[in-house]
Image (cartoon, grey):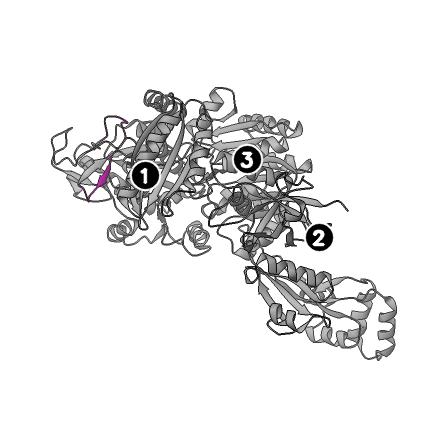
Amino acid sequence: MDKRYAQVVVDVPTKQTNRPYTYEIPAELKDDVQAGMRVLVAFGHRSVLGYVVRVDVDRPADIEADQMKDILTVLDSKPVLSAELLELASEMAQKNFSFWVAFLALMLPAALKASYRKKLTAKPTLSDEDRVTYLEGQQERLVKTKDFSAKEWRAVLKLRQEGKLLVENQIEDKVRVKTELAYKVPADEAVLAEAAEKLGKGAKVQQTILAFAKEHLSQTFSKRDWVAQVDVSAAALNTAVEKGILEKTAVEVKRRPDVAGDGSIDTVKVLNDEQQAAYESITAAIEDNQDKTFLLEGITGSGKTEVYLQAAQSAINQGKQVLFLVPEIALTPQMQKRVEDRFGDKTALLHSGLSAGERYDEWRRIKEGKVQVVIGARSAVFAPLKNLGLIIVDEEHESSYSQSENPHYSAKEVALWRSRYHQAPVVLGSATPSLESRARAQKGVYDLLTLSKRANPTAKLPEVDIVDMRIAIQDRGDTNFSTEMLDKLKAHLKRGEQAVLMLNRRGFSSFVMCRDCGFVPRDPNCNLAMTLHMDTRTLKCHYCDYQTAIPRICPSCGSNRIRYYGTGTEKVEEELKELLPDYPVIRLDQDTTRKKGAMAKALRAFGKKEAQILLGTQMVAKGLDFPDVTLVGVLNADTGLGLPDFRASEKTFQLLTQVAGRAGRAAQQGEVVIQTFNPDHYALTFAKHHDYEGFYRQEMSIRHAAEFPPYYYAIQIQCAHPDENAVALQTAKIAAWLRKQLPEDVLVLGPSPKAIAKLKGKYYFQMLLKMKNENEADAVLTDLVQRSQNAEKDLQLEVRRNPVSFM
């Protein structure tokens, strides 16, 4: 018989290999091995987990047939990864300078990253010697894969083939399938007839159970269903088992996350002209199986969600599935509610806030094809959907769509890849699109759809008032609340309305700002805010490594009130209690939302008006839709502007526009107060007038002059080491090597310490590459990553394509 071979990507965490290895498929597994399954293979002197990526491949020419290692066992009864996801994992690994196996593992729920054991049971013919060697002299033994060498596993499988040893898979999942008690009706009517003869005439309850059983041969119902349908007690069901009418069994219960919906139906709304035009463009692409990318640019409250939902319904009507991505699902329970109210049980939820069991069961519901809409955060982009007809990326500008830890990837890029694979459209939606997306729409790469007015005809965009805190602190001293902010808060609260207050507390970075004129020191090369380093008492640029002393006198106005800037939500909450003791505050930040469901619970309480003030970090800027919120206050607009990031102005404008959009979404006119030490900064003045187009033109001209994205592609190279001198030296050597290897038109900035120079006992340095051609440096960087595998063990190197943050 011809030998069969399979290619397997092995999971070797010490030095992950980034290519498939060829293994022989043993005769006893010939019908069991398929691409997309997890297997156990010998690698070196141990057994490891592997993923089958191809079957029926040729044996490598440089290995003799008798030297081939074989697959030891198969861990799945069906493939857990489709051909699409196998191909996607390979391409994403190459594009993101990462490892194939890292992406394969990322696509599966934690339950499938389990520990595997085998139960070995001796048969009568097993020799005493083998019983001692493999079963420690016992009748049966539970063993882990690492308990035996590859050679020993071969001997075990040989004993199984000879009929001397029974080998059974025991998968110790991190989560188990959840079951509940059930009762099964026998398949044979004769069994029921025999039981009926033995029943006395007075056994009325048993007669009722028997009558129901005769109509449902072979069927199984949970205890709850029996009690509900036949109206009998649990004791009566147990008696029916004793009398042979029923058999006890267990049925699986799929764990479902808490449904955000309250059972109400989300009614389909009539679209206005702009919404209708956007809907028709998207549905035409769904019907024609076109992999078009639409940028739906709609002001806050313009009804983007209704366009998404009606387009999703159109895809479902054609028998297709919908993938709906939101930036952070824990922060948008209202969006989850709308999707579930519209599509009910055909919705699955995937995000990191679920328990391992819930995530595993939701993943299996999707894989089994029982789902039409998947809503989730970044990692949901890998959901095992087989018939995608539409992909929606809401708030497409959000940086949380990019994964910063290894393996790095952008969910938007994955969505575009899957769109091409399934010939399905993608809708990128935002009130403030990223400059990269907007520039692509400008060039016609994306189709631009615009919603310029609020969906509710009575709702107007709120009035925005910018307060100069330089004057406010002269009047009221060092406070978080200007007189204007306090007066407006009191007026709105007195009328029974609600207010959202945002403290912009992004990142760990410290910066310096003049409290009199708002001046923030910038470096002369990159024109970016510099980071404060108290240890060396210097200001540094984390792009080009320019540094200077911390100024004692403001170079702009001559004031000596130049200070480190920052405050926290707890401090603001205390100040609010003193200033407005009659109004309770709901606080939303990382500390108060750590517990599962805490965010949704707090928002429900705010929705019920248990408090009139909602105070939070950026999480209050996104997706909230409360009709009674008529005032939004931004306590410190400058924090984002002071960050050492070329996207600082863009992120600040987006955040201010988003949070302003929380006000006046119903009939009442909304107001927004933005407190700042830089009232004339263009990001603030354009946000005041809700003028995205003006901001886009201004920011693009600045990016063009500074040679930053979207005019150039950017790649960040980050090195980490416990010894600061070692990482500085190694990064300098890498930079010198890169300058020799890369084409002349690729700019290499740095190396320099990162903005957060030390974290968890390691020092971080970075370099930035800028280039016109996206893939110009790929070959050199792939070579660099491969070489880094042989570097000293404490040096870590990561390469990130188009990073969203340089913090």
Residue 599 is situated, as x and y percent measured from the top left of the image, at 43, 51
Between 161 and 289, the residue placed more toward the observer is 161
Q: In which quarter of the image is residue 741?
A: top left
Query: Of the residues tagged 2 and 3, which is closer to the observer?
Result: 2
Residue type (three-letter) at the residue carrying disc 3:
Glu
Other-residue count near label 1 (Cα within 10 Å), few / some / many at <14 / 14–19 / ≥20: some
Residue 20 is situated, as x and y percent measured from the top left of the image, at 58, 42
Label 1 or label 2, whichever comes before in sequence order: 2
Compute the Cα span from label 1 to label 2. 48 Å
User: Residue at label 3?
Assistant: 91
SS assignment at label 3: helix
User: Residue at label 1?
Assistant: 730
Indicate left or right for 490 with 797 as reference.
left
User: Residue at label 2?
Assistant: 29
The secondary structure making up most of the magenta span is loop
Q: Give the range drawn in magenta.
A: 522-536
